[in-house]
Image (cartoon, rainbow, N blue to C red):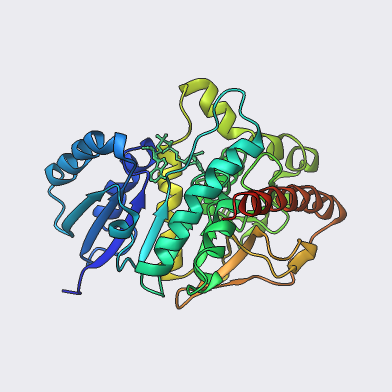
């Protein structure tokens, strides 16, 4: 059997981690023959809750889990890790401005970036889930200069899965029959869920473009887009808590694809450092369609983008530039 790899999950006492840890431990992410040492990071007041999570992992009797390391110390949490799920973040509280939220998170992701830089394997794959995910990933990478910027990504896979599920339901087909829906931009309500390149398997023939199958452009550019953009808020309003099971599944999907690559002819969406492709602002973490091979992503080039799409990309790109400016101002004002 292979040597165990060290995998860290931050926010390990929280609700996303509660679903995610089982998926990792059961081999869904890194493979059924990959032993694991799980590092669980949370803040000191959550250590007793974390103890309960550790007990439950033991009680799951997962053969792949060789050791569990619960800690409140980033130096321990990030030591020699090959994969990092950065889930823990400061949640938005009532009356909190975006600037306050960014400010709290800049500090968290600075500390974690520095710890990754110092203690993690240089090949570590870092997935940022905690919000604002795109800008947190940018800040984390800034403070981990010895780790390639390529290795940092932010999660928009939940949005992709939501979009896929909406289209599948509309067409009355299974989710796996829908491919190549793209999420562009920020993981926020400005994101652009785009079905222009998506295909659907209907009947026995070759996949057909989703626009042809749905035959309702107004829906694909209207309710479909807003439903996906506002799905997180809809879940909160119904459940009184934010998406957790689906967020954990998306984090597992994202890391799985980074590890094993994308299927031929398929793209997945993730927030990655922008090179300005498709007119997106460079040097922000922007969600693009990517293909993945040998654990390296590449932005899929040459996909058609109509004027409607370009307009949407401009809106979400502008928001990411504003977030970057605010986050960097926090870094400067605090001499971070
Ligand atoms: P939660 O509040 O249940 O858990 C968060 C955990 O993070 C808590 O246990 C907290 O103590 C911990 N934490 C806070 N600061 C920390 C630090 N500096 N180091 C380590 N741990 C720390 O929240 P939940 O529901 O698990 O969500 C986590 C994050 O994921 C939130 O920021 C949420 O907005 C975000 N999220 C992102 C999604 C995406 O699609 N990118 C989807 C859903 C949620």
Residue at the farthest bottom position: 294
Q: How many marks?
A: 0
Give the quarter of the image for residue 167.
top right
Left or right, residue 218 beside residue 95: right
Left or right, residue 27 beside residue 131: left
Residue at 58% across / 45% down in the picture? 132
Left or right, residue 292 beside residue 65: right
Look at the image and tell me whether residue 270 can be seen. Answer: no
245 versus 137 height, above or below: above
Residue at 70% across / 70% down in the picture? 275
Q: Position of residue 116 (x, y in %)?
A: 41, 64
Q: Position of residue 244 (x, y in %)?
A: 42, 37
192 versus 258 height, above or below: above
Of residue 195 and residue 124, the one placed in the foreground of this image is: 124
Left or right, residue 102 beside residue 80: right
Q: Quadrant of the N terminus?
A: bottom left
Of residue 255 and residue 182, the one placed in the foreground of this image is: 255
Q: Quadrant of the C terminus?
A: bottom right
Residue at 84% across / 50% down in the picture? 311
Q: Position of residue 191 (x, y in %)?
A: 68, 46
* Ligand 1 picture quarter: top left
């Amino acid at each position: 059997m292979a040597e165990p790899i060290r995998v860290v999950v931050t926010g390990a006492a929280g609700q996303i981690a509660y679903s995610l840890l089982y998926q990792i431990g059961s081999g869904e992410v890194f493979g059924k023959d990959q032993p694991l040492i799980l590092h669980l990071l949370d803040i000191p007041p959550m250590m007793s809750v974390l103890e309960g999570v550790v007990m439950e992992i033991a009680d799951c009797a997962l053969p792949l889990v060789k050791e569990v390391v619960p800690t409140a110390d980033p130096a321990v949490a990030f030591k020699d890790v090959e994969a990092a799920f950065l889930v823990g973040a400061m949640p938005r509280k009532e009356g909190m401005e975006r600037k306050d939220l960014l400010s709290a998170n800049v500090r968290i992701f600075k500390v974690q970036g520095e710890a990754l830089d110092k203690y993690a394997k240089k090949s570590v794959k870092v997935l940022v889930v905690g919000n604002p995910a795109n800008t947190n990933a940018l800040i984390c990478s800034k403070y981990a200069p010895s780790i390639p910027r390529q290795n940092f990504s932010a999660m928009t896979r939940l949005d992709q899965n939501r979009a896929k599920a909406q289209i599948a339901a509309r067409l009355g087909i299974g989710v796996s029959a829908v491919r190549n829906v793209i999420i562009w931009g920020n993981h926020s309500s400005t994101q652009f869920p785009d079905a222009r390149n998506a295909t659907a398997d209907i009947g026995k023939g070759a996949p057909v473009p989703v626009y042809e199958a749905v035959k309702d452009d107004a829906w694909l550019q209207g309710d479909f887009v807003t439903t996906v953009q506002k799905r997180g808020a809809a879940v909160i309003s119904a459940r009184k808590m934010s998406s957790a099971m689906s967020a954990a599944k998306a984090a597992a999907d994202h890391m799985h694809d980074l590890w094993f690559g994308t299927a031929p002819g398929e793209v997945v969406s993730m927030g990655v450092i922008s090179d300005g492709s498709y007119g997106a602002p460079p040097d922000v973490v922007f969600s693009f369609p990517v293909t993945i091979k040998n654990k390296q992503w590449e932005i899929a080039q040459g996909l058609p983008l109509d004027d409607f799409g370009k307009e949407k990309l401009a809106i979400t790109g502008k928001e990411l530039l504003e977030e970057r400016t605010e986050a960097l101002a926090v870094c400067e004002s605090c001499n971070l």
